Each structure stands twice: as C-alpha cells, then as structure tokens.
Amino acid sequence: MTTIRIEPTDALILVDVQVDFCPGGALAVPEGDQVVPVLNRLSPHFATVAATSDQHPANHCSFVAQGGLWPPHCVVGSPGADPHPDLDLSRVGVFIRKAFLPEVESFNNFAGEPDLAAYLRERGVRRIFVGGLATEYCVLNTVLGGLEQGFAAVAVTDAMRAVDVQPGDGDRALEQMRAAGAVLADSSEIVG
Ligand code: VGL
Ligand code: ZN
C-alpha cells in the first residue's frame, strides 16, 4: 500500500461517465454508476479536471446496423449522451468529444476534440489520474494515449468498471495499462 499525493501538476480525467454507459442505458456497463461517488470524492482535490465523452452520429460505424459491435449509444444530442446526472462537473475545465464522425471509431480521448494533450500542457499538467467507463475500451485507450503523449498516468482502479464481454477483459486491460507504464491505485491510496 503506497500513498500518492495529488500535486498541482496533476489532472483528473473523467472518461465517458455517460447515461448510456450506466445501468438502464443503451450500452450499460455493470455497476457503471458506482464510479460516480469515487470520482466526485477525488475531483475537489485537482487543479485540473477534464470530462470526456462518446458523441456518435446516429449512423456511426460502431453500431450493429452498420456492421459494428454495439447497439446505438451516446448518440449526439440524445439524453443517453449526457453525463451521469450525479457526476460533479463543477471543476471541469474542458469537455472532450470523440468518435463523432460516422466512419471513425475511437476509444482514445487524446484523439478527440478539442485537443486534450494541448489543454493539459497549457495548464502545466504532467500526470493524469484516470477513471470512468469502460475499463477495457475508453479508459484503457485514454491511459495509453496519455502515456504516448508523455504524461505520467495513474489508473484509479475503483473509479472504473469493465464491460467484460469476455470474462477477465477488465483485468487484462489493467495489466496492459501497468505494462505500458501506468501506476494502478485504489482511490483510498490517493490523498489530496
Ligand atoms: C465505449 C464501447 C463503445 C467506452 C465506447 O466509452 O468505453 N465502449 N463505445
Ligand atoms: Zn461508442
């Protein structure tokens, strides 16, 4: 058990905590809403907070009707694309949207708009803390994207949930994050 102290050069990234990824939503992640209180407890301690989102057009290539894997979800302008109503957005300085073109799928919020890495650098951020939905898709690829951009990364394990299409997908994603250089930490190890 190590303690990680939140520094002024740290940022919290709230990944895709959207209505459609929570219980009752179109692509519900089991226990997806349980990340909300964990993220809400962390966010007041961060000088920089970013929120990201899936914002798909109705004919997005990832949807079953277009040959993709997923039911329609997070359709731009629909209630399912909204952030979870209990998520504390009061400290969010930037909202990132991604996968908004019909032919482009993306799980990496560093490939969204506006440019997340540029925003973080402008604010002097050197390390990102990441939680949200879902562990093995957008959280994984956002952690890997942040590492590629040169940020240190902490994956907050109790602040994320997995879809687990195959049992163990979430755990394998955590191992991938660790192998790529991320620190895995429970929120109880993180102090403001
Ligand atoms: C996601 C599946 C499809 C995610 C997005 O945000 O993790 N997963 N689209
Ligand atoms: Zn999606």
Image: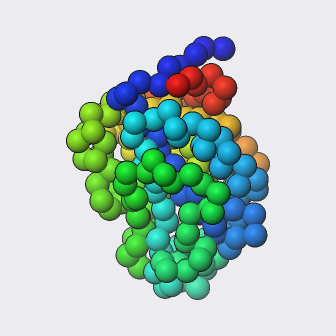
- The residue depicted at 76 percent of the width and 48 percent of the height is 167
- The residue depicted at 64 percent of the width and 76 percent of the height is 71
Residue 48 in which image quadrant: top left
Residue reaching furthest top? Answer: 2
Q: Would residue 36 appear left or right of 106 to someone viewing this image?
A: right
Above or below residue 77? Residue 11 is above
Q: Quadrant of the N terminus?
A: top right
Residue closer to the observer: 62 or 110:
110
Colouring chosen for the image of the structure: rainbow
Above or below residue 6? Residue 147 is below
- The residue depicted at 56 percent of the width and 52 percent of the height is 88
Image position, residue 178 (x, y; %): 54, 29
Count of number-bearing discs:
0
Above or below residue 7? Residue 59 is below
- The residue depicted at 53 percent of the width and 40 percent of the height is 43
Residue 7 in view, yes or no:
yes
Image position, residue 79 (x, y; %): 59, 77
Q: Would residue 174 appear left or right of 109 to someone viewing this image?
A: right
Image position, residue 148 (x, y; %): 34, 39
Image position, residue 141 (x, y; %): 47, 48
Residue 17 in which image quadrant: bottom right
Residue 174 in view, yes or no:
no
